[in-house]
Image: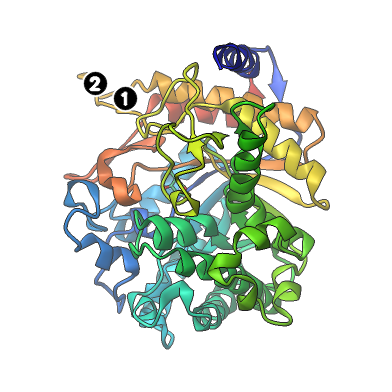
Amino acid sequence: MAEQQRNCGAEAVAGRAQPKAGLKFPDGFVWGASTAAFQIEGATRVDGRTDCIWDAFGRRPGAIAGGDTGEPAADHYHRFAEDVGLVRQLGLGAYRFSIAWSRVRPGGGGLNPPGLDFYDRLVDELLANGITPWATLYHFDLPQALEERGGWKNRDTAYRFAGFAESAAERLGDRVPFWSTLNEPWCSAFLGYASGVHAPGRQEPEAAAAAAHHLLLAHGLGLAEIRRYAPTAQAGITLNPYPVHPVDPDSPEDRDAARRIDNLQNRLFFDPVLLGRYPEDLLDDLAPFGFADLVCDGDLELISAPIDQLGINYYRGYRVTGRPAVPAVPAGLEWIGSSDVGFVPDPTRSLTHSGWQVEPDGLTETLVQIDRTYPAVSLYVTENGAAYPDSLGEDGEIADADRVAFLADHLRAAHAAIEQGADLRGYFYWSLLDNFEWAEGYGKRFGLVHVDYQTQRRTPKQSARFYSEVVARNGLG
Ligand code: FCB
């Protein structure tokens, strides 16, 4: 074990890309920033919007740090023009946002034109500023009324999603050239229905397994609607792969633990979308949850309909062991049996304010591995970023040197993946603005731009200036 930890340390130092002069990204590389509706919009009760699962979850005592809710967030609903101005000021060519189902079809029911009008205004504002809109249809915010009918455990929710996708694509498909059906379905299924740390806060492993399949079905059905109304758009899905390694590669228990976690975290989503099948060994692992019975004839054909681009959200990796008496299992994966799988932090890595290990080399590994494992598809890093405890200096500046280093290291890692052959076409930092970080509330700040939630004043951080220099040069100096 000691030797293993020493090896990991050596890897970490080697993997942390050393400063190199003059890294250039390919011509046409897309530079952007990401946000999500519930995390920034606020205005939860206007223009016909009704509750999504995060509104309801926020009313549950203790569910969200500090008792925070979706109000006021960054009040983006009313300040979107100012925020688009910030994207422009940074020199970014693209902006990734999500569309709130509860605005467009409140309660999962009929169309609410005033809710959809907001995205119309946003898209037009982006285009008027020369910024390409990237729309995500679902970023964790299921209408609460659908949750009350079973949520993602209920197959019908996937068909309701298709109706929402139809409304959004019909109205915006003429102007939005990049679409993603779902953001991180792993989180929706496993954090929402297994660990319950995300809305709707259920702890039902069977529901989590069902949710995973129904989310994928929703992807397939939603993709068909995007194709119908935006036939020339680049459409796809956004997944959140984690590189998974056994603590001891020589231990059969550790290797088996890594295989199972890789299946649940990664292959449960990548394989059906890109290969049209679930891994056989995963089906065996999920047999106790009746997973195979959920898959109806035709589902996998829909789920694996060709996509044009694959969004990759990357934050960190996992080191796992199959031998017990090890530290805690991360939320979402504990339900497969914490008695025989453990997650072991790498002591050589620094941590962000979220307690996430900083592992830029894992980004290179992930992109290269996806490129080599699956049929060709354009890759975009649609999220990558870090929370740090930023503070406003007396001079009014936010000197977030940690975030600058994080960004520089991950951009070098992304560049290394391109050098190794990965078809990576763009990078979006998470996030444009400080925002509502789900169960962590407003306490974790990921933004390039600081938000004072009392005054709603926006202040670009040092990282914003750094990023905009990278963008202007299409590389690192
Ligand atoms: C991702 C989510 C995004 C944000 C970042 C930090 O998993 O997609 O909304 O919370 O993590």
Image label count: 2
Q: Which amino acid does label 1 sit on?
A: Ile
The residue sitting at 20% across, 62% down in the picture is 60
**Residue 43 visible in the shown view:** no
On the image, the x and y values in percent for residue 241 come to 60, 45
Q: Is residue 320 left or right of residue 474?
A: left
The residue sitting at 46% across, 69% down in the picture is 207
On the image, the x and y values in percent for residue 336 come to 50, 53
User: Cβ of disc 2 within 8 Å of ligand 1?
Assistant: no
CA–CA distance in space, label 1 to label 2: 6 Å
The residue sitting at 52% across, 37% down in the picture is 315
| Quadrant housing residue 57 | bottom left
On the image, the x and y values in percent for residue 296 come to 67, 81
**Residue 145 visible in the shown view:** yes
Tell me the quadrant of the picture where the N terminus can be found: top right
Describe the element under mark 2 as helix, strand or loop.
Answer: loop
The residue sitting at 36% across, 49% down in the picture is 82
Of callouts 1 and 2, the N-terminal one: 2
**Above or below — where is 457 with respect to 208?**
above
Q: Residue furthest bottom?
A: 110
Q: Residues within 10 Å of mark 2 (few under 14, many from 20)?
A: few
Question: Which of the labelled discs sits on residue 304, or is there none?
Answer: none
> Can you identify the residue that label 2 sits on?
393
| Quadrant housing residue 460 | top left
Q: In this view, does 426 lie to the left or right of 183?
A: right
| Quadrant housing residue 24 | top right
Describe the element under mark 1 as helix, strand or loop.
Answer: loop
Q: What residue type is labelled 2?
A: Gly
> Can you identify the residue that label 1 sits on?
398
164 and 299: which is toward the camera: 299
Q: Residues within 10 Å of mark 1 (few under 14, many from 20)?
A: many
Check whether the beta carbons of the residues at disc 1 and disc 2 lie within 8 A of each other. yes
